[in-house]
Amino acid sequence: MKYFELAIEGPVHEVKGFCRGVRAACHRDAVLVFSADEGIERYGLADLIKMLIHADSVISHVICAEDLKDKLVSAIEFDKEYRVREVVEIESASFEFSFEAYARRYANRIRMIISKQKDATVELLELTEEEKPEAKGIEAYAPEHDYEFKGSGKVYGRFEDVYKAFCEFKAEPLISVSKMELKLKD
């Protein structure tokens, strides 16, 4: 399925409400993502220049599937209160992550989250697992732990798959994620 990013001009909260209303009327289960809310960015030099030129207007970046995109664009053109500045197809997405766990049960939970990503590509860049039996004991605020599981990596692929992984990784308190980056088609 193809995904698109729409740059919609108008007051942010109104644009969100309008888009959610169109989704509710047309495709209740359709993915609708507001980039600023989710930590998604795609700003390159050209985007920064556009933002400077249109500094007085508020632009919301909205991501959705092709069928919802067509409905949103039609509804915005009909309503005329907002304006679609740009519609660009998303080629791929990616984000980086890191994690630290000091107990096996948490390490196993992290491993499970990483291993269940079948559609997005997960690349582990760094992974260390260390046992230090001499440090065993009361460890709540200890400078050293008897078990350490640390690592970092990158997730990339189709937007839909990466977004699903992004949400799952973000929901785990022991995993830190960067902002998601979008690669757009020219």
Image: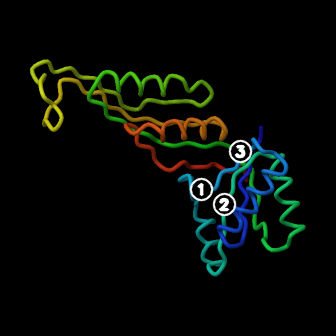
How crowded pointer 3 is (Cα within 10 Å; few <14, some 14-19, many 20+) is rated as some
Give SS at disc 3: loop
Q: Which mark is residue 130?
A: none
Contact flag, marks 2 and 1 (Cβ < 8 Å): yes
Q: Position of residue 151 (x, y in %)?
A: 35, 32
* Mark toward the start of the polypeptide (2 vs 1): 1
Query: Mark 2 or mark 3: which is in front?
Result: 3
Against 50, is 105 above or below? above
Residue at left offset 61%, top offset 49%: 182
3D distance between C-alphas at marks 2 and 1: 10 Å
Give SS at disc 2: strand
- Image quadrant holding the N terminus, namely top right
Q: Name the image quarter holding residue 148.
A: top left
* Mark toward the start of the polypeptide (1 vs 3): 3
Q: Position of residue 176 (x, y in %)?
A: 40, 42
Q: Position of residue 162 (x, y in %)?
A: 60, 38
Residue at which label 1 appears:
42
Residue at left offset 65%, top offset 41%: 159
Residue at which label 2 appears:
61
Query: Mark 1 or mark 3: which is in front?
Result: 3
Give SS at disc 1: loop
Image position of 155 (left or right of 20): left
Residue at which label 3 appears:
31
Q: Name the image quarter holding residue 105.
A: top left
Image position of 59 (left or right of 108): right
Image position of 74 (left or right of 20): right
Q: Name the image quarter holding residue 141.
A: top left
Q: Position of residue 186 (x, y in %)?
A: 73, 53
Residue type at mark 3 is Val
In terms of depth relative to the viewer, which is nearer, 36 or 172? Answer: 172
